[in-house]
Amino acid sequence: MANILEKFLNTTNNLKSFDDLNATKVIGVNSGSNIFSDLIEHSDKYTSSNKGSMNQYFNIYNNRLNYFKPRIINNAKSIFGSSIKVTSKVLDIQPTLLSQSIKLDQPKDSINTKGLIFTVGTIYTEMKYKPDILNQVSKDIYGMPESPSHYTIQNDSDRADFSQNSEMLLEDESGRVVLKFDHFEAPKDILVTGVVVGIRGFVDVDNCLQVLDCCYPEALSNKDLKIEDDEDSKILLISGLNIDKDTNLPLLQKLQEFLAGVSKNTKVSRNVVFLGDSLTNYTNLNIMNDFLLTLIKSKTLTIIPSFNDPSDKALPQRPINMKLFERKLQINSNKLICSETNPFYLDKYRVILESGDSINDIVKYGDYDGIESRSEILKGFIKWQNLVPTAPDTLNIMPFDINEKQDPFVLKESYPKSLIVGNQPELININYNNVQILGIPIFSKTKQVVELDLKTLDYEIIQL
């Protein structure tokens, strides 16, 4: 395959040499601050000093709760009034006379709000098929590969009885309380494990917390972004190559022809960003090597890994080690090809790019079929101000002993200008709180590439 591709690209007239490309003005996406890279580079600084400690993950949850709690209370007072009664701990919630007077089918508008309580905690969802590490260890099946693609829905009866297969709780350092949504009009699935939320409601006769309203952290600011005029502020976004020698080599060849500029008459950006799932397995690494070797003759490349790529399996993922590839790629890394972290923060344009593992993990453990549900989850990342709420419950994350100010997955001070997420079933484009959210489709399934102008956030879908 390498010889064919080399011959093809060497015969095209519009390709430039390495030196010519280096002389051109390109975006240089690896320049500027990357908070995720900083965390990885200083990992020894954030490692717990107590080597026998097993509560690293507790610190992550607790620090996020402590960070969001005052901001949620401030937002609740602005929404429900300063006289709102705040219960400091979940286990301090007690039934009141109001519990005895509210009927199950009573409309929410008719409930007396004076006796309602308000508390802040972290959502935890218990699901029927979600892996349980204690159960795995007890059955001596720890570390076995996970075969199901959907862990809450296994058959039609599960789908019909989804409410019976999952239980949602609110927890803090004091304990947990079961949540019920008999009077809650908003869809229940907007809450996922790890989200810090304020709940206004009452304790029913079963000592469960009946939810009437949910409250999230007060909104962040949208800072103005001053961008200097660039010769080329456009990037090509490609996710889900899923390179496989047995299935999609013709499609890969078609993509190469397009990127070389011979299969279409349109001029596209020189800057290409691959958003995860580039490989189906590591045995196809040599094909990816040949693919990248041909592309650097006409493009500058940025590679962001996912859990299926040759990087570690915990967020933030380290950049793919360029030593896995041939020396021709190694000597041109940081010039024509950049290997970056997942997620990756492009400081110059205030854009967060990630391969989609966070949203795909939420979908995997919940009944969230369809683009509408995925859109709500993506909006949730901005609403919750948390990019990886299910980590470390079902999504691997490094157990750093960091405080709330150092947490790179929590949005602080201001929103990003754009959040770009790879490996989605189809293109998603929504605007929430003045943040443009883009879901990039899986190329191996949709044959779609997205060209985005980072200055204007205008985009074009290119169908191959």
Image: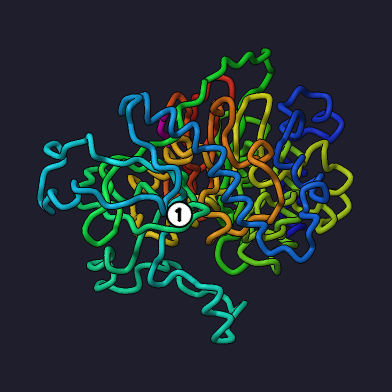
Q: Is residue 464 above or below residue 57?
A: above
Task: Indicate how the structure is coloured in the image.
Answer: rainbow
Within-10-Å neighbours for mark 1: few <14, some 14–19, many 20+: many
Q: Residue at x 46, y 58 (%)?
A: 175
State left or right for residue 122 relative to residue 101: right
Q: Compared with residue 51, is residue 390 higher up or lower down, i.e. above or below? A: above
* Magenta stretch encompasses residue 430: yes
Q: Which one is nearer the viewer's eye here, 422 or 292?
A: 422
The x, y position of residue 297, in whole percent, is 77, 40
Between residue 439 and residue 255, name the one nearer to us.
Answer: 439
Q: Is residue 412 magenta?
A: no
Which span is picked out in magenta? 428-432
Q: Which residue is mark 1?
A: 171
Q: Position of residue 53 (x, y in %)?
A: 72, 63
Residue beneath the point at 12% across and 49% down: 101
Q: Main secondary structure of the magenta part?
A: strand
Residue at 36% x, 47% y: name it. 190
Percent x, y of residue 423: 51, 50
